[in-house]
Image (cartoon, rainbow, N blue to C red):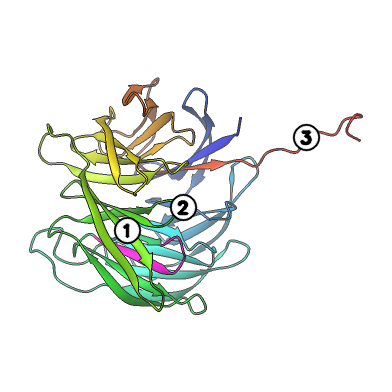
Amino acid sequence: MNKYVAYVSSYTQNEKFGITIFDVDMKKGRFTKKGVVEVSNSSYITISHSQKFLYTITDLGVESYKILPDGMLKKVNMQSINGMRGCYISTDYQDKFLFVAGYHDGKITVLKLKPGGAVGDITEEIYLKGMGTVSERNFHPHVNCVKMTRDNEYLLAADLGMDHVNVYSMNHSTGKLKLVDIIRSEQESAPRHLKFSKSGKYLYIVHELKNYIDVYSYENKGNGNPVFEKIQTISTLNDYHAKGNAASSVNISYDFKYITASNAGDNSVCLYKILQDGTLEKLFCLPISGEYPKDVSLFPDSKHLVSCNNESDTLTFFNVDPELKTLIMNGPEIKIEKPNCIVFKKLEEEAPKETKETK
């Protein structure tokens, strides 16, 4: 069986270790603590597409780590983003650029990545402008997610404050962005995070304040002409739920067959099956036994699920059966301060030891 580790990022109000590394027991659907990394307020982490490096938000900017064969991390460097602490981080599909979303200052930052995984200089800084609905949150731009299309042509930036997703063409030589389209959401819906299907033909945007996922088809017409067409809107809640809910995450399974979405307030997770036409079929929406599931992810086998419960300082674990549409708690919670994000990493297989027979 393949071996995995899991990286969990955390705020560091009382602890100095913003990343916790766990060994993953795929058979039992459980974690065992392996190590910690000293990082200040790691609000989000991502792994390069080469699977060789991990990047994290920190109070001072961003930090790069080399992933060692056993899953432990070795720091490469730190780089400033010339702004307030970011809330989301991702790379392009060639691992040449790093993108940072700025919730607090409404900023998109692009940084060059070096061949050895180090984060280089800033190539682009865009402060989004505008005035949204006059309320505490939707009064000015809040960039909450930045992610490339799978064809590596366009960067999408979810602006939770302005209720839309900006679409930028990417110059892969200069690292500069050019606005080419805007995907507009309902007023006060607050687009939060987005994911693409395996084919890259479908886009899923979760909306924080109105608790639903919009599904779009995507076609690249070339010459800076991307086409996004909405094909479905589906709730992240049950018909029976309390008020005061906020959708907090959306994730796609490792086999690209399922999507999970979590809800704060309701403290629940929804599991959806991805159909052939890219639309979603809701399988269940059930409680996760914690407060504010800021990130929820299926294990790589899609038979287990873990929830990062930010306000109850816990990880909770469940057995999942998509066919039976069941979610059953699996063992005790694990205490961890203010968890924000979780990423699984498959470890490289060890070469077989040389014996007399193999010589």
Disc 1/disc 3 C-alpha distance (Å):
45 Å
Label 1 secondary element:
strand
Tell me where residue 257 sits by quadrant. top left
Residue at the (40%, 41%) spot, across then down: 15
Tell me where residue 243 sits by quadrant. top left
Indicate which disc, 1 or 3, sits on the residue closer to the N terminus.
1
Residue at the (17%, 34%) spot, across then down: 238
Residue 46 bears which disc, if any? 2
Indicate which disc, 2 or 1, sits on the residue closer to the N terminus.
2
30 vs 352, left or right, is left
Residue 311 x, y percent position in the rendering: 27, 37
Disc 2/disc 3 C-alpha distance (Å):
30 Å
Residue range (magenta): 149-159
Disc 2/disc 1 C-alpha distance (Å):
25 Å
Q: Which residue is mark 3?
A: 352
Q: Which residue is mark 1?
A: 217
Which kind of residue does numbered mark 2 sit on? Thr
